[in-house]
Amino acid sequence: MAEYRDLLIEVGTEELPPKALRRLAEAFLCGVEQGLHGAELAFEQSRYYAAPRRLAIQIDRLVASQTDKEQERRGPALTASFDDDGMPTKAARGFARSCGVEVDQLGRFETEKGAWLVFRRHQPGQPTKTLIPEIVSKALAGLPIPKRMRWADLEDEFVRPVHWIVLLFGEEVIDSEILGVRTGRETRGHRFHHPGTLYLAEPAAYAPLLETEGHVIVDFEVRREAIRAQALEAAVAVGGTAIISPELLDEVASLVEWPVALCGKFEKRFLALPDEALISSMQTHQKYFPVKDEAGRLMPYFIAVANIESKTPEAIRKGNERVIRPRLEDAMFFYERDRKISLDERREELKNVIFQKQLGTLYDKVDRISDLTQYMANALGLDRETTARALRAANLSKCDLLTEMVGEFPELQGTMGREYAMAQGELSATALALDEQYMPRHAGDTVPSVIEGQLLAIADKLDTLCGIFAIGQPPTGDKDPFALRRAALGVLRIIIEREMALDLRAVINEAVLHFKNVTPSSTAGSAIARHDVASQVFNFMMDRLRAYYLDAGIRPDVFEAVLEREPLHPYDFEKRVRAVTRFRALPEAESLAAANKRIHNILRQASDTIPAALEENALTEDAERELYLEIKALEAEVEPLFARQDYEQALMRLAVLRVPVDGFFDKVMVMTDDRTLRRNRLALLKNVNTLFLRVADFSRLQG
């Protein structure tokens, strides 16, 4: 009967990078699991632990040894293995040699179909403890660490210096050396509360022992939720609610082993700063959680999370208050100084800031963005006032990058543009557009809410896309230094989600015109010919659109069916995709998709010239006349639907073609010897095909 034990692996280090801790722990667990599966070592469940000074894995009920195997390998047939004198042939000797034995040590395998030489060997399973060190070492070597470091005089490399390693299998230590450190059963507690070692009797004691004696909550999720609960409780005590972003919560959980939340305060005068500036100062620089009141207004409080349970918490609170005060003083100083210079006055300074060496300055970029904004406003038929607001936003779009506030807090680009625009009396839509030009800023972020912001965001992103492609530096592999994939998806999302009637290819062509004198970089891996830039950008964006729909659960063949028709308007593309997806759910869909595929093949292979119009008098069969009359009635019915791009309703109506189309193929010979009948029937099928092609190429749909 198989024996099972728990396994504990702990790598104790100097403080690990907080933003990478969770990713490292998950990758470590994945690597160990893959190693166990590869060695055919079964286990019941696994989990990772992660804290600032440790990565750990616990495997429950891991089998103590590999299963023995009976290896069997069939060789040549007996008739080919021995000659007439019973001597082994070359085939038999070669097979035996490949198995590492003599011919007389081989067995025989016989069935009704014949007999063969066979090699059989019993392969005992290896003890798990002999395999674990190599599995752990390989998992650690495979962690996503951009830059590894060495320490002391060791050759080993890791993300941080390693001080101890626990490798405990049941109650037994697996004796080995990993990353230059001898394995053992002693872990270490909190750096201040329990800096000494802790003896581990068995893996199951790990997390409870560290928490009760070591002052370390080693479970990342438990520690994360403890921080959330403490922060919320501390905010309630001052009549507010803690603003807790998931990213900051992860980071704080990666900075502390024994979290203790404390509520601090700052002077109310700092509330005159824009909310985003206050929040950024607290979150980005200090790792504090801001506090808001019931109305959503910021309060002069913050929640700090200490890594120690102090006997004098008041001293820690005051220390944090002393630290944040100069930060906020700096922000207030920058804010007041920035407002003394208008955004208009800063525009000329953009000539001194390089956007990209070959693409010119930010001033040049702003000019291009303004031109493209004007083009799109004209294409959409916007009124003069809206266009003027959009152009005003375009002209001011990069001015806030020169402010001291954005210099100190780069994440506030756009946000401070909005604040300074409002302060200097700009229209609200213009000011809001300055902020919304960067939307969507990340996956799941919202798209711009006002048309001025939508135009500016599209113009900015397309200018970058077309410019970088023009100099021959498109993304390669996982390298995308200009975030072009995000920019492309952002443009598509804005057009689709805001239902904008924009011809994407036309807008790209217009954007590319601004780079007609740009020469591709001599260092570019594959310089793109200038006349190909627009096509390259368009195809790149279609690839992003494919990913967008796959993430949304749209089947790949639906996307390909619509793409085949090359819709140039992303919102039109969206309506077609949704229509085809809904159509697929109909009971008639499978039959009509198969019929479209059959029609597509017939028309493609037909050698006849298909007439533009069929002759009604040449319809001799009832089935073809019935199909013709149904098509004729449907054409008049669906044309208005196609005209207003109501593809869903159009396809709902076309679904009635299932019966006459099936009847046609059941009863009518298309490729008859009579040339007149054949050409007329091909024309009839082309009419069916044309109706469906108004939406998508249904022959691309899979069953």
Image (tube, grey):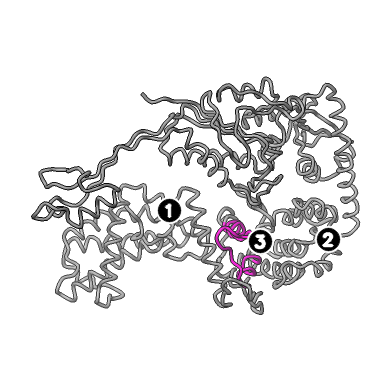
- Residue 276 as seen in the image, left or right of residue 686: right
Establish if 423 lies above or below 393.
above
Establish if 369 lies above or below 321.
below
Residue that protrudes farthest toward the left in the picture = 84
> Mark 2 highlights which residue?
343
Mark 2 or 3: the one toward you: 2
What is the magenta range? 463-492
Residue that protrudes farthest toward the top in the picture = 212
The residue under label 2 is which amino acid type? Answer: Leu
Residue 170 counted in the magenta span: no
Q: CA distance from mark 2 to mark 1?
A: 46 Å
- Decide which of tag 2 and tag 1 comes sooner along the chain: 2
**Residue 114, horizontal then vertical, whole percent:** 12, 47
The image quadrant that residue 395 belongs to is bottom right
Asked if disc 2 and disc 1 are in contact, CB closer than 8 Å, the reply is no
**Residue 454, horizontal then vertical, whole percent:** 65, 58
Q: Which label belongs to residue 455?
A: 3
> Mark 1 highlights which residue?
579
Local crowd size for mark 2, using a 10 Å CA cut-off: few (<14), some (14–19), many (≥20)? many
